[in-house]
Structure formats: structure tokens, C-alpha cells
Image (spheres, rainbow, N blue to C red):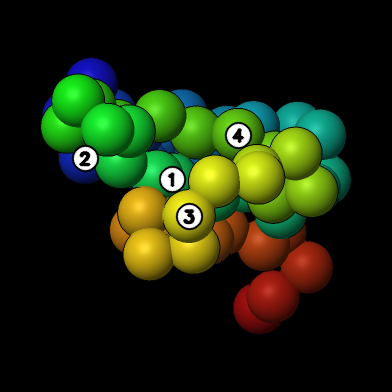
Amino acid sequence: MSLNDAHAFAFSLATTLMVAIVIFEAGDGSLSVTPANEFDGDATAILCEIDPFTP
């Protein structure tokens, strides 16, 4: 998934679920998104966090 695709998907999830979403880079270099409260990986792997409550 490209960074643009990951960002669009994360924004859509954040606004639909109304939870903070993180975009992170997995060990193999691919990008993924998950709710912030479910991310238990290395904090340095996080590229971006999208919070729907932040203006």
C-alpha cells in the first residue's frame, strides 16, 4: 500500500469509527493502518497518527 493510499484509508477509518488511527511500517517495509489502541508494536514504526477529534 502506498503512503497516499494508507493515509486515505486511515482518514476514512478514523472518521467512520471516530477513533485515532495509526499508519505504521511493518518489518517487511509494507504500510498498514490500525486503531491506535490496538497497536502494540515498536513506536518508531509509526509514521502518522490521525485523530478525528483534533481540528
Provide the residue designation for mark 1.
23
Label 4 packing within 10 angstroms: few (<14), some (14-19), many (20+) = some
Q: Which mark is residue 42?
A: 3
Residue type pointed to by label 1: Ile
* Neighbourhood count class around disc 3 (C-alpha, 10 Å): few under 14, some 14–19, many 20 upward: few
- Which mark is nearer the camera, 2 or 3? 3
Give the residue at x 43% y 45%: 23
Q: Position of residue 31 (x, y in %)?
A: 29, 32
- Left or right position of 2 against 19: left
Alpha carbon distance from label 2 to label 1: 9 Å
From the viewer's perspective, tell me whether residue 26 is left or right of residue 20.
left
Disc on res. 3: 2
- Can residue 42 be seen here? yes
Q: Residue at x 65, y 43 (%)?
A: 39
Q: CA distance from mark 4 to mark 1?
A: 7 Å
Res. 32 mark = none
Answer whether residue 15 is visible to the viewer in this image. Answer: no
Q: In front here: 20 or 29? A: 29
Under mark 3, the amino acid is: Asp
Measuring from the top left, give residue 9's x and y in whole percent. Answer: 46, 29
For label 1, the SS is strand
- In primary-sequence order, the first of circles 2 and 1 is 2
